[in-house]
Amino acid sequence: MTKKQSNLTETTSSVTSDKQKSPPLNRKKPRVGVIVACLGEYDSKALRYAILKLNTAQSFVEYEIVYDVPEDHEFVARTRYGGVVRTSYIKQAIMSFEAEIVQRPSELFKNIPQTPCDRYLALCNCELESGVYLFKPGDKIRTMMVGSWRRYFAPPSLLEFIVDMCIKQGIAEAFGAPRSHMPSRGCIFDYNDILENTRNGVLIGHVCEECATYMAPNNPNWDEIKKLTGGRWLGDPSDPFSAYCELQRLGFKVFKASGVRDSLLRRLIDTVPIQIISKLGDHVALGIAIFFALLLGLKNWGKALGG
Ligand SMILES: [Zn+2]
């Protein structure tokens, strides 16, 4: 009996003859890989869901969460736990980090050659000494530093802000990105020197005439862009399949939270009063009723004695 060789199992060797290889997929959309390994405490299931949900909200770019990351690389250790990091360090460390990120997908997976994304966005829980929060230190990798985020920056929440930056990266990869401009117009390409000032661009989601003119030769899908920006990717709250409802099921209170996850205090404020305060209210009402009943009873008793 001859032993059949299976190539459908997880243990298939990555070293396979050319005959056995499947041709690489002929992709038409650019791909944006989002690296969450450096995000530390701000990483959440809600955030990962929201990033991938963008794939159903438009047709011009595909988003991927990059899980195959060299977690033991020094770049990850230096950027995931908060604190201030020097720009020169990022520029120096990103070279070997990016080389590994780009190299890994070139290995075969189930006999199919993988290809690296066209663009990567590494989300980092640190801040740069210069205050810059988004820049391109590598060839394909942009880094976004969210370590300077504070709760009073909300709205939007940090989750909404990060997703908005992913949207912007996708638009830029698909249609080309105009240079950021200094006048603040509520445009997604407004230049903001600090993270807090990104608020209006995220909430309004406008594309100004200057930026629209720049992108026009690449035929952007304006209908889809409008649906993505200004928080409209969250969808209709009355639709149970919308990102809005799914994020709530994942424990994220849309439009209320100011982090990627709700704080314990916020969760208490949002949930406890519904159950406890109604009971407290019942008790208070009962107490007032007893008080007036006793008062009335005392008065009647006094009248009976006096009268
Ligand atoms: Zn603009």
Image (cartoon, rainbow, N blue to C red):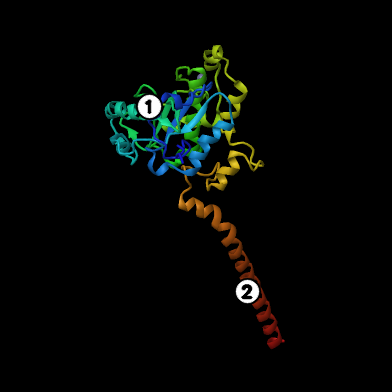
| Residue 127, numbered circle | none
The answer to which image quadrant residue 79 occupies is top left
* Badge 1: residue crowd in 10 Å (few <14, some 14–19, many ≥20): some
Q: Residue 134, image x and y in percent?
A: 39, 28
Q: Disc 2 on helix, strand or loop? A: helix
- Does label 2 or label 1 sit earlier along the sequence? 1
Residue at figure coordinates x 70%, y 81% from the top left? 300
Quadrant occupied by the C terminus: bottom right
Residue at image position (48%, 39%) is: 48
Look at the picture and state if 293 lies above or below 266.
below
Residue 102 - label: 1
Residue 85 shown left or right of residue 239 in the figure: left
Q: Which residue is painted at 67% across and 76% down in the image? A: 293
Q: Is residue 157 visible?
A: no
Image location (x, y in percent) of residue 142: 39, 26
Which amino acid lies under the numbered mark 2 shown in the image of this protein?
Phe
Circle number at residue 291: 2
The amino acid beneath tag 1 is Val
Front one among 21 and 36: 21
Q: Nearer the viewer, residue 12 or 44?
A: 12
Q: Position of residue 19 (x, y in %)?
A: 45, 24
Q: Residue furthest front?
A: 1
